[in-house]
Amino acid sequence: MLQIMNRFVKLLTVSTVCAFLFACTAQDDHQDLRDYMSETIKKPKGEIDPLPTFSPYKAFVYSAMTQRSPFEKPVLEVQRLAGSGQLDVKPDLNREREFLESFNLSQLKMVGTLRQSGVLWALIGDDAGSVHRVKEGNYLGKNHGRIVASSDLQLELLEIVSDGLDGWLERPRTLTLEEKE
């Protein structure tokens, strides 16, 4: 008897669900939706605008590389006037240039010292990560900078720079030991 009752309940549930589905689809309440769809289909199709054309990227060429760095102090007018009377100051252009003369002085840093056979050698680091030994009399930087004095904490250089009037000036520079924190 229980099986007959279970079958009856299942049959009643299925028939009720079918009746609700038929009732939902039998009504024609969606006529407004069908009208909107037919109007939309009848409208003319729109056109998509073409993609805009982009001009190719033009790379910037930095042309001020040969000029004086804006971060270095300029040759003062007083030094130019005082140096114009020194006719014996000029670089030795026939001298063979040393390796560290291919760097700007701002690219070099003093990283240490070394005393060997009574000679004090300064250790100079460049931008490439290399370390070079120099002593008094060696040259550094692009402005004919000769080392005139050295100590454990600094190097004193004497650069020869143009005064702008077809003459030359001696400009003192100092390279101090850079300490790591």
Image (tube, rainbow, N blue to C red):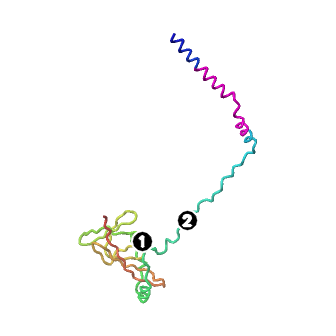
What element does badge 2 sit on?
A: loop
Write down the residue under mark 1: 104
Q: Chief secondary structure of the magenta span?
A: helix
Q: In x, y percent, where is residue 46?
A: 72, 47
- Which residue is at a point 38% across and 73% down the rendered structure image? 140
Q: Nearer the viewer, residue 158 or 51?
A: 51
Q: In x, y percent, where is residue 155?
A: 32, 74
Residue that extends furthest to the top in the rendered view of this protein:
1
Q: Earlier along the polypeptide chain: callout 1 or callout 2?
A: 2
Write down the residue under mark 2: 60
Q: Would you say 46 lies left or right of 15 here?
A: right
- Stretch of the chain drawn in magenta: 13-37
Three-letter amino acid code at the position of disc 2: Phe
Kindly indicate the quadrant of the structure image that contains residue 158. bottom left
Q: Would you say 14 lies left or right of 156 here?
A: right
The answer to whether 55 is drawn above or below residue 30 in the figure is: below
Q: Nearer the viewer, residue 1 or 154?
A: 1
Kindly indicate the quadrant of the structure image that contains residue 178. bottom left
Question: Would residue 129 be counted in the magenta stretch?
Answer: no
Q: Count the marks.
A: 2
